Amino acid sequence: MENLNEAFEGNRESWNKRSEVHFVSEFYDNKSFLEGKISLTEIELSELGDVKGKSLLHLQCHFGQDTLSFARMGAKVTGVDLSDKGIEFANVLKEKSGIDAEFIVSNVYDLKENLKGEFDIVFTSFGVLGWLPDLDKWAEIVSHFLKSGGIFYIAEFHPIVWTFDSKFEFLEYPYLKSEMIVDDSTSTYGDESVKVSLRDYNWNHGLSEVVNALIKNGLEIEFLNEHNFSPYNIFENSVESSKGRFMVKGIENMIPLVYSIKAVKKS
């Protein structure tokens, strides 16, 4: 497929279907969120720091649980997602929770056309970069929306994870930047018991590609951390090594499952 717009439209449709399943799933547990739970993981909470009084832009926010969690912690938040159904549910969650937030339907690459202003923090996390073919363009968008001295933070599944087959038995995809990968599936991680037909268009990005894109666009890396666990039980054959920390059985402590980066926009 040469037309990226077709890929983006296919992913929008897939995430609309996922949103229908995820919003009512035990995995996302909106009941606990509405009772006051913060949905952010220990990695994000420990590394990003205090957001109270800060303006925060959340890229690829799904249906906004994490966005609203930041607002619950005192930030002034804006959430953006490609999925119109996801943003529809984000506004439902916003109304039910009584938390103030702004949500926008937009492809990240089109965000300049749909949003104005600069932010103290630009945030994105978990399962986001694989949907984007061009990280230089992505990092330029991040930089554009950051104030001078503003913070960019990402927690993301480590790219080594996406080189394996789903059972972590053999290498299936290249680690370094690859051509578009088309994947068909009949379920989603939010609730695998629900049958849903999905066609996804993804791209693998090595860690150096992520870091270099940020540096090229005026961001100074404060840290790059690699974590040997996932805060989410989404991989086959996972075992809980300690509460809220999941590893893949048979290769525990052998590979990182998550990485995180904090960077500052140069003055």
Image (cartoon, helix red, strand yellow):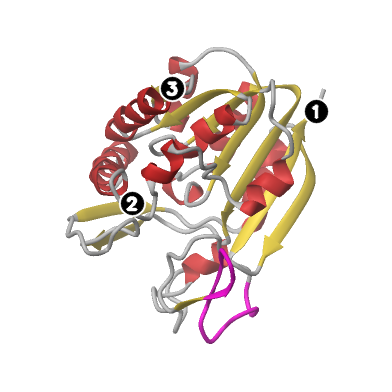
Asked if residue 214 lies left or right of residue 233, the reply is right
Instruction: Report the amino acid beneath label 2.
Output: Tyr
**Kind of element beneath mark 2:** strand
Instruction: Report the amino acid beneath label 3.
Output: Gly
Q: Is residue 114 above or below residue 93?
A: above
The residue drawn where x is 61% and y is 26% is 56
The residue singled out by tag 3 in the image is 98
The residue singled out by tag 2 in the image is 201
The residue mark sitting in front, 3 or 1, is: 3
Q: Which residues fall within the magenta stretch?
A: 240-255
Asked if residue 154 lies left or right of residue 192, the reply is right
- The answer to whether residue 242 of the structure is visible from this angle is yes
Proximity of marks 1 and 2: CB atoms separated by less than 8 Å: no
Q: Is residue 171 above or below residue 12?
A: below
Q: Position of residue 248 (x, y in %)?
A: 51, 77
Whether the magenta-drawn stretch holds residue 250 is answered as yes
The residue mark sitting in front, 2 or 3, is: 3
**Kind of element beneath mark 3:** loop
* Disc ID at residue 266: 1
- Residue 153 position by quadrant: top right
Point out the tag, 1 or 2, that comes first from the N-terminus. Answer: 2
* Disc ID at residue 65: none
Whether the magenta-drawn stretch holds residue 263 is answered as no
